[in-house]
Image (cartoon, helix red, strand yellow):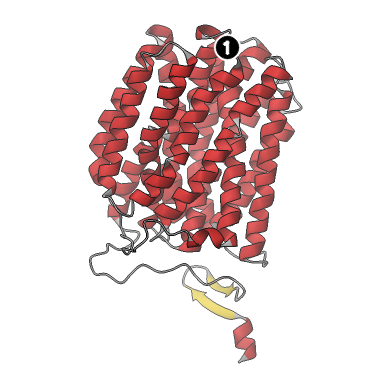
Amino acid sequence: MSDLQDKVLEMDAENGPKELDNAQPPPPPSDPVDDNVPGMDLPRGWIVVLACFFNLMFSIGTTTIFGVYLQEYELVEFPNDSSSQLSWIGTLQGAMMCFFGIFVGILCEHVDTRILSAFGSLMAGVALIVASFCNSPWKLMLTQGLFHGFGGSFLYITGLTLAPQWFNKYRGVATGIVIAGSGLAGLWLSFAINSMIQNLSRQWALRITGLITIAVCGALSPLMVLRVKPKKRKRIADFSVIRDKRFILLFFSALLGASGLYMPFFFMPTYTVVTFKMSEMWGTNVASIMNGSSVVGRVAMGLIGDKIGPLNTLMMATLVSTISILVLWLPFRDFGTLIAAAVMFGFSSGAIVSLVPVVTANTFGVTRLPSIMGFIMLGYAIGVLLSSPPGGAILDKYGHGTNFTGLISYGGAYLALATVVNVVLRIVISRKLWIKV
């Protein structure tokens, strides 16, 4: 019997026998037995994925294309204000989306997610419309930054956490498709906004985007349905998870990953214009190339995660992102190499957002996923605050607005640390190399 206890062989109809690691932690909690709970991997789940896709497109997607607005603010509208100050607009947008996500995650366990999504659609859209009437950086920080981040958090968290509940076999690819919504926003919305800025104005670009957000996300809100409702408990939030070392490592993985994630999206368009003396349209082109590759990458990372394990994939993706920044972008001043770095970073970096919910669901179960992801959002929020404003300050103080070496090194260092944390998490969960984690 001791030999049987050392190794357990599980027959898989498709893959044949595979070795299970007895040293792994117990499997995540299973769904409660309830005849009213829909099954997993059903067509109904893909309808929820569609709605989540558009929620991500018009929440975090508007943050990834902020570089187009930043380019307009830095070079045209507010040329006398520092890059650090102007980058706070987009930073607050992303950070508040994550910070308020803590509370939205808790609300998802107590309030109908369809109501939360509809509320977020209205708030995010109104925020952009109000921002269109602002003509100073500090007003844009409050509206396009903080106010939109608040409304976007309801779209972001509901969109990020609902889809994994509806799938088991296809959880990684379903989440990847949802996250690809933000990448697709960067692919078409960056061109659309740049065109509106050039042909209409920055103000009308914000107004039109706000109206589209209200119309599209509001119409899809009735589809944002939780599959499994958590059991009612006396406490509003369950903080017991924060003592779990796996959660702590996931938290810092999100924090460090977010710290390095947004700088290329924010500053690579401006880098293109300043370093290569190209038109603003070329800055938009580079942002679109990066976002376009991220659309493919986020779905591909989900597919790979379903095959070899989401944590294994996340670990490799952060390593590739690090290489794209520190090995390609940092040492070279060649436009072709910059495009290669943009494609490589866009393809791999989406895993920093798309696979963390999958790793969380696989580790802690889907029932408490919204509230646990809400806590992890705090890590993302801190990471966003540590990214672009300090990076912009480094660019202003040491690069004098034209030398991006310090900024690129700063962002790359965070990605390298995120890779190390993911490796440690992988070892904590299992020391065996050739298993799906």
Q: Is residue 293 visible?
A: yes
Rendering quarter of residue 71: top right
Q: How many dots with numbers?
A: 1
Residue drawn at the location 50% of the way across and 39% of the way down: 296
Residue drawn at the location 56% of the way across and 39% of the way down: 382
Residue topped by disc 1: 81
Give x and y (percent) for residue 240: 49, 62
The answer to whether residue 365 is left or right of residue 227 is right
Rendering quarter of residue 189: top left
Name the secondary structure under disc 1.
Answer: loop
The answer to which of 134 and 205 lies nearer the viewer is 134
Give x and y (percent) for residue 387: 60, 32
* Extreme residue in the right direction: 331
Quadrant of the image containing the N terminus: bottom right
* Extreme residue in the bottom direction: 1
Give x and y (percent) for residue 131: 38, 19
Q: Residues within 10 Å of mark 1 (few under 14, many from 20)?
A: few
Quadrant of the image containing the C terminus: bottom right
Rendering quarter of residue 54: top left
Residue drawn at the location 39% of the way across and 9% of the way down: 201
User: The disc labelled 1 sits on which kind of residue?
Assistant: Asp
Q: Is residue 185 visible?
A: no
The answer to which of 127 and 50 lies nearer the viewer is 127
The answer to whether residue 379 is left or right of residue 276 is left
Residue drawn at the location 28% of the way across and 31% of the way down: 122
380 versus 356 height, above or below: above
230 versus 122 height, above or below: below
Give x and y (percent) for residue 59: 40, 34
* Extreme residue in the front direction: 234
The answer to which of 385 and 24 lies nearer the viewer is 385
